[in-house]
Amino acid sequence: MLKPGAMGAFLSLLVLCSRAAEDSIGSQLPAEVSMNELAGRGGWLIVTLRLESGQELPLVVDTGASGTMLDKSLESKLGKPLGRAMSQAWGVKKTNNIYPAPKLYLGGAPLMMTGPGIVTDDCKKLSSGAGRPIMGILGMDVLEHYCIQLDFAAGKMRFLDDQRADHQKWGRAFPIMALNAKDARPSVGENLFGAQGPHSLIDSGFDSDGWLMPQFFEQWTNQAVPPAKGEARSPAGMFGGETYPFVSLREQKVESDGIGLRFLARHLVTLDFPKGAMYLQRQSIGPLPDPRLKTTRMAALERMSKAVIQEDVAAARKALARIEQSGATELEQTVARHLEAALENEPKPAPADVPPEVAKLPLGEVRPELAEVGWLRPAANRIPLNGEIESPLLDSGKIYATGLFAHAPSRYVFDLGRKWKTLGGEAGLHTAFQPYARGIVFVIKTDGKEVFRSSVIRGSKLVRYDIDVTGVKTLELLVDKAYDQNGGNWGLWLDPTLFRESPKNMDARQ
């Protein structure tokens, strides 16, 4: 996203502009507006402004942009260019045209803007990322004049009169300061790793939780080790002395850390720019759910799923007892037993060590010699705790009782000890990510030799495999990304099961 930074003499002019008209802002505040559905839930906050001509302009609200930007298609309506200015985004510099700033309205209220001009740029990438037409960015040259409240729980964006408002209801205050001596964009003196001192840019135009500079990112990821009982998770964040589970932070080689919209959305956020304060009143433990990530529900497993998410073994045992005593289906009972067992975390044998009288063995019930995944952590018979989907169920259009979480690129290695006959099961993508996954390929190797390779799996497509593992010592299950990009590639090995003999022969005898 375009982040207009220092623009030389042009922005120097903006800083010197008079703000005498701000005394009358209180009587011209825009009315409350509804947020778009995806704001803070995996998408940007988008508001629709209006030109004096009545043309509507959907703009991304971006506190990380020092200036407002409009799409190049509007240049013919903006008059003669005032000049050119340098801007940069994540270290990439470019030159943009400056045009006279048009009058912008939100509802019937005109918006204040510092300085006489705005920049233009191509908004095709913004539109593609938003999944809808976007005509620009609403930056700090407008936002700095207002006290803005973002109420994600109510889905409302409000412009408040900070002279008369009750600040006590806004939550904890954090001073807003300039990012550095050369960059006036808003920041706070703490990062999402809980470190004091480094400034973090308040960036509502960053749709994830935020980012850390390399030195802090390395320290943060070093926390990503399983606790004693071996639960799979990503490291928690820390801000204002509070712990935030399921944060998703990126490493960025820039000169500051950053706080994004997905993190802010856990709160009632009040950005009082004129008085230099950000207020946070926490409303959610984890990130707000993305409504696009649909999952399959099993009503009988709701209590069990909640217990697993909260890592409450006692509650999981009670939930299992209720399910077994109820009229739950055999599948529901089986899934519940595996979820409860995953919390108990009892030691598992290798397939080679399982007694010969066991004729059928799900791989989710045994210990791999090696387990690697491309996102989060390896997990058997469940999805690892994460901030993207709340359900721990193995879900690929329907619920499976056993399996392996295998976000690409992933690799599971098992010691079979030359004691098994066949391997059978299915594989596919997690339901929530089927519309967004770039594409994956499932691969099976026996003693280093590739014996199975699926076609490219996207969407709801499933693949079935039946592999002869007679005399095989080492079994490898791999998931590779099909293309360069790896987004959304939540692969799942579904009910992968070893048999002492062919399942057909077993069925015939039964």
Image (tube, rainbow, N blue to C red):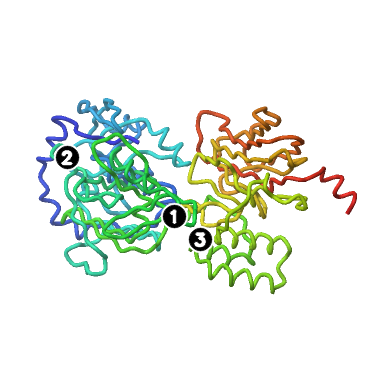
| Label 1 environment density (alpha carbons within 10 Å; few <14, some 14–19, many ≥20) | few
Q: Which residue is mark 3?
A: 309
Q: Which residue is mark 1?
A: 227
Residue at the (65%, 59%) spot, across then down: 335
Task: Locate residue 107: give its quadrant.
Answer: bottom left
* Residue type, numbered disc 2: Gly
Q: Position of residue 201 (x, y in %)?
A: 25, 45
Quadrant of the snapshot with the C terminus: bottom right
Residue at the (26%, 27%) spot, across then down: 97
Q: Which residue is mark 2?
A: 115
> How much space separates mark 1 and mark 2, taking CA atoms?
53 Å
Q: Is residue 433 above or below residue 315?
A: above
> How much space separates mark 3 and mark 1, taking CA atoms?
15 Å
Mark toward the viewer: 3 or 1? 1
Mark toward the viewer: 3 or 2? 3
Per the image, label 1 sits on a secondary structure element best described as loop
Per the image, label 2 sits on a secondary structure element best described as loop
Q: Does the rendering let one see residue 46?
A: no
* Residue type, numbered disc 1: Pro
Q: Is residue 74 above or below residue 175?
A: above
Question: Of marks 3 and 2, which one's residue comes earlier in the chain?
Answer: 2
Q: Position of residue 448 (x, y in %)?
A: 64, 29
| Label 3 environment density (alpha carbons within 10 Å; few <14, some 14–19, many ≥20) | some
Residue at the (59%, 44%) spot, across then down: 368
